[in-house]
Image (spheres, grey):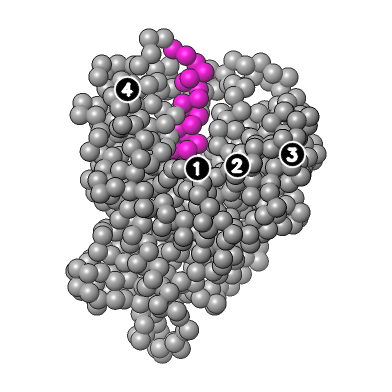
Amino acid sequence: MKLKWIPAALCCVLMTTSAVRAVDWKAAEKNGEQSQRMIDFCSNYVRGWLAYADGRSGLLPMGILKESQFYWNAKDSAADNYPFIVLTGEITGHYYTKLAARHILAQEQSLCNRLGALPDDFNFATQRFCHPKVDLERLIFGASEYCKDGLIPITEQLGPSPWLDRMQQLIHGVWDNAKVETPAGIIPTKTVEVNGDLMEVLSRMYWLTGDENYKQWCFRIMDYYCFHDPLTKWRRIPLRDHGCEVIAGMSEAYLLAAREDTARWQKYKPAMHALLDAILADGVNEDGLMYNWFSPTGDKQKDNSLSDGWGYVYNAYLTVAIADRADQYRLPVERVLTNLHKYRDRPWLPGADDYADSIEGAVNLLNRIPVKSAFEWVDSQSDKLMAFQHDDGILEGWYGDGNSARTMLMVAMWKTQGTTATPWRKELQLGAVRNDDGSVSISLQSDKLWSGELHFDQARHRQFFHMPVDYPRINQFPEWFTVDGDATYEVQVEGGATTLVDGKALLNYPVTLKTNETLHITIKATPQKPDANGQSAGSEANAGARQNSVN
């Protein structure tokens, strides 16, 4: 084994070797075997779908099962498939995948923009728009979905990038064309899914940019659903995708108000609490899993099929609990996670996408409330999901295949505690475990000679979005072990001396492995002196270590 150690200006070797920590290296190695399968799954997915890219435009089809699906659209192709080709390339460092993803971004803007920055459906056979006339509702729907399901997860992981620039163009395009008059003011649409999408995106864009327009637009939609069209008056409240987005969006607007406009937050509280209480009263089964929909008034008949989007709605419960600084809505989340193991053999709707959404929701919640049996459930469901993939990398041949890659990337990064590698090739096994002292132990093994970099995660919610708290939200990639660029870390190769390394150096940490070599590394933040606010560098990473202790 050969480590390309960080330059002397950034680190030094301690005079003594640290005491050997109690590390479960077998667990770390097993996590490496599992993450290898998941990264290989995602790489094969990319290979399979890029083979079907249009030969002239380079854009991806909405589906590959019939000729009528050979077109690109914003709400499906761009929102659910394309972004996870982007993220697979960026996370693994696959050079040509990254090039293809950036080319597609340039092409969709060049060919698909129809009303300013708003894109429309693009037909591969004619190399023209699919529809002869502009339909503003279609354009707003597509742009909003592209932002929430496509550009937000990219930005959550990568931070500022050309995809963030594209998202800002789309959001301003949507609001430049807002024409729907309501008692709360003019909004772009009354379509509940779109308004949920917009609240999720607008709240995060406000945190990221500080632009007051984003905050006021978000509050305008929230005002509408709290004061003029409350969900508790609806005949049916949706608890799965294509409807439940509004609940998650309202929770993000609620937290935004709690931190930025306390008077407004207090006004929102009765409507927000009434909605969450109604769901718990009539929208969940005995174990806390949610139905696809329920009726809070009048017709009390439930749709007894369970929603694979249950985790998305429970994000709202934890977010409100954070905003209110109370456990009232945290306890129902603990309940459902504790009961999740009972559903290990329950099939979701017969498709990979349904498994993907359910697993995604669970991982995001488990990042905040670790439950061993629920993590085991995630493992079992991930195996079922990956079994959908064919030898050519395709799962089911529609845009929803991308959601499966999204979820497997997310689970892989739980297995590595947020650490990634470039190049992350098939022969590399990267796994990690968290230790009782807050450190992380990395197992790295390769069947072939490997030279590259490890990338330890950072507190992206703070570094990229400037958020006051890492609240649970759809389309984020959870933070596990994070490093602070201003902190110093002890780095110990098993059996060797301990080295002090600057946190910035851990963001791109060079390593070389010989064929069939296994490398064990443990990283721990050193104690820091408190600053004027009583905080110390690395304190957030250590807090996360205590919270997310289940491997």
Q: Position of residue 77 (x, y in %)?
A: 38, 32
Whichever of callouts 4 and 3 sits on the residue coming sooner in the sequence is 4
The numbered mark at residue 68 is 4
Q: Position of residue 253 (x, y in %)?
A: 66, 38
Whichever of callouts 3 and 1 sits on the residue coming sooner in the sequence is 3
Given this view, does label 4 or label 3 mark the residue nearer the observer?
4
Say what secondary structure mark 1 lies in: loop
Question: Which amino acid does the dot numbered 1 rest on?
Answer: Leu
Quadrant (top left, top right, bottom left, bottom right) of the N terminus: bottom left
Whichever of callouts 1 and 4 sits on the residue coming sooner in the sequence is 4
Say what secondary structure mark 3 lies in: helix
Question: Does residue 540 appear in the picture of this structure?
Answer: no
Task: Tell me whether circle 2 and circle 1 mark residues in contact (CB < 8 Å).
Answer: yes
Is 463 placed left or right of 110 in the picture?
A: right
Q: Distance from label 4 to label 3 (Cα)? A: 41 Å
Please determine whether, in this image, residue 21 is positioned above or below residue 147.
below
Question: Which amino acid does the dot numbered 4 rest on?
Answer: Ser
Given this view, does label 1 or label 4 mark the residue nearer the observer?
1
Given this view, does label 2 or label 4 mark the residue nearer the observer?
2
- Residue beneath disc 1: 349
Q: How many marks?
A: 4
Given this view, does label 3 or label 2 mark the residue nearer the observer?
2
Task: Tell me whether circle 3 and circle 2 mark residues in contact (CB < 8 Å).
Answer: no
Question: Which amino acid does the dot numbered 2 rest on?
Answer: Ser
Question: Which amino acid does the dot numbered 3 rest on?
Answer: Leu
Say what secondary structure mark 4 lies in: helix
State which region is magenta.
134-156
- Residue beneath disc 2: 305
Is 89 placed left or right of 319 in the picture?
A: left
Please determine whether, in this image, residue 538 is positioned above or below residue 291.
below
The numbered mark at residue 275 is 3
Whichever of callouts 2 and 4 sits on the residue coming sooner in the sequence is 4
